[in-house]
């Protein structure tokens, strides 16, 4: 119950921030795409997403928060209600196309898709996990994948969790299998297909500053790119 109340408060606070930002047109001007971060376990995904959001002054939505919101029709509807009436039909149309063409089904993904599209409509967000890059329109987000060699990831998890190397290997292997199965089951695709991302970064060879700098530079490049058809 305490966790549910905490999530509800987070959403209520976020809704208030969105309502305030809608009264400030300068915030909406050239807000740019949101950033979706997919990652293999042991790639510092959460730490990098948190720091990226801090530097860009973006909101961070992790998979746990999105999962709880998608399970609650009340929370999902509260987020959807922050979108202008004129944009809601477009969200509905996109969600329907997802269910027709991408094999999604069920109430959970119906709520999740609408929530992700509403977040993208507001902009200035980093979304970690939950298949966001597979649900959102490609032109609405910078899609990032973080990877690293298995040995580097095992070493990181063993150090972070204070566990033996073999136990860390089992955890990394299981979590990677679960994440890839989630994408394969719901989107009939390979999570590691580089053609699905705008940026694939190896955290095993790049330091945090290099990774964050590359993502920020890519985001700026997309943000400043003229709309299609404009020369």
Image: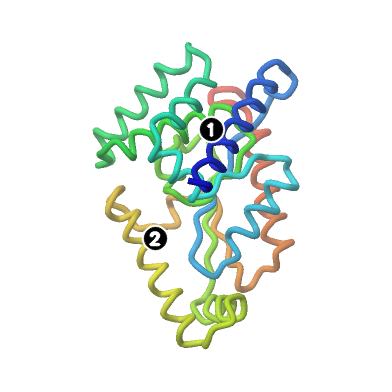
Farthest residue to the front: give it.
Answer: 1
Identify the residue at horizontal 67%, vertical 60% (top origin): 211
Q: Is 229 situated left or right of 107 in this image?
A: right
| Circle 1: element type | helix
Q: Which x, y percent locates residue 169? A: 45, 81
Q: Quadrant location of the C terminus?
A: top right
Find residue 20 and report its image quarter: top right
Residue appearing at x 66%, y 18% in the figure: 22
Q: Name the residue under label 2.
A: 179
x%, y% of residue 112?
A: 40, 38
Residue 27 appears in which quarter of the rendering? top right
Above or below, comparing residue 173 to residue 138 in the picture: below
Q: Which of marks 1 and 2 is nearer the N terminus?
A: 1
Tell me, for residue 175, which label it has, or none.
none
Q: Residue 119 carries which label?
A: 1
Q: Residue at x 68, y 26 (%)?
A: 30
Q: For the residues marked 1 and 2, what is the alpha-carbon distance in whole angstroms?
A: 22 Å
The picture quadrant where one finds residue 210 is bottom right
Image height check: is 216 above or below 95? Answer: below
């Amino acid at each position: 119950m305490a966790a549910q109340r905490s999530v509800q408060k987070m959403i209520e606070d976020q809704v208030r921030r969105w309502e305030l930002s809608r009264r400030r047109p300068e915030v909406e001007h050239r807000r740019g795409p949101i950033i979706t971060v997919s990652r293999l376990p042991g790639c510092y995904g959460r730490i990098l997403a948190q720091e990226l959001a801090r530097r860009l002054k973006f909101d961070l939505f992790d998979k746990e928060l999105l999962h709880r919101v998608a399970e609650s029709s009340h929370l999902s509807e509260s987020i959807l209600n922050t979108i202008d009436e004129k944009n809601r039909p477009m969200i509905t149309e996109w969600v329907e196309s997802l269910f027709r063409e991408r094999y999604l089904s069920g109430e959970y993904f119906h709520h999740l898709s609408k929530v992700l599209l509403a977040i993208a409509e507001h902009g200035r967000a980093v979304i970690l996990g939950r298949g966001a890059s597979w649900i959102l329109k490609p032109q609405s987000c910078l899609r990032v994948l973080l990877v690293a060699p298995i040995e580097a990831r095992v070493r990181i998890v063993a150090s972070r969790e204070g566990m033996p190397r073999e136990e860390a290997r089992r955890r990394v292997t299981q979590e990677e299998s679960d994440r890839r199965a989630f994408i394969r089951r719901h989107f009939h695709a390979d999570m590691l297909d580089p053609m699905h991302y705008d940026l694939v970064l190896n955290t095993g060879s790049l330091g945090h500053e290099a990774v964050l700098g590359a993502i920020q530079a890519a985001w700026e490049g997309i943000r400043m790119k003229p709309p299609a058809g404009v020369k």
